[in-house]
Amino acid sequence: FYPNISSFQYLSSISIITLGHTPMTGLVPEVFWNISSLSSVELIGTSLSGIIPNASFTNLGYVMVDKNSFSGSLPQSLNGATLLTELH
């Protein structure tokens, strides 16, 4: 079972997302990055693509998005992620 990633828009209080090494493909919906309570994201080794958009990353402390097909630069809004301790 793999969730429909667009359904994350209904999870406004989720804090940890761990979906690494799953057969997910395509773009990550922008709503995913706008979950204000998100503190940890692990998407390593999927086939996700596109850019990581500017978003509110104020609670984000751990991000693992390597081994994907993301393009572009890291968003400037990551500078506001003062709790960020790990970025891969």
Image: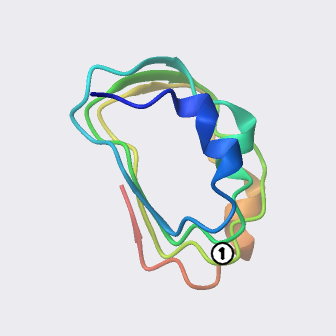
Name the spot of residue 25 as percent of width and height, x first: 42, 16
Above or below 88: residue 37: below
Above or below 70: residue 8: below
**What element does badge 1 sit on?**
loop
Q: Quadrant of the C terminus?
A: bottom left
Label 1: which residue? 81
Classify residue 58 as left or right of residue 64. Answer: right
Dot 1 crowding, Cα within 10 Å, few <14, some 14–19, many 20+: some
Front residue of 85 and 60: 60
Image quarter for residue 82? Answer: bottom right
Q: Quadrant of the N terminus?
A: top left
Q: For the point 51% across and 21% down, which residue is it?
A: 49
Q: For the point 74% across and 53% down, which residue is it?
A: 34
Q: Residue furthest top?
A: 26
Classify residue 4 as left or right of residue 78. Answer: left
Front residue of 83 and 34: 34
Q: For the point 56% across and 84% down, which residue is it?
A: 83
Classify residue 81 as left or right of residue 34. Answer: left
Q: For the point 33% across and 28% down, which residue is it?
A: 2
Name the spot of residue 21 as percent of width and height, x first: 21, 34
Image quarter for residue 79? Answer: bottom right
Front residue of 58 and 31: 31
Q: Residue furthest bottom?
A: 83
Amino acid type at mark 1:
Ala
The colour scheme used to paint the residues is: rainbow
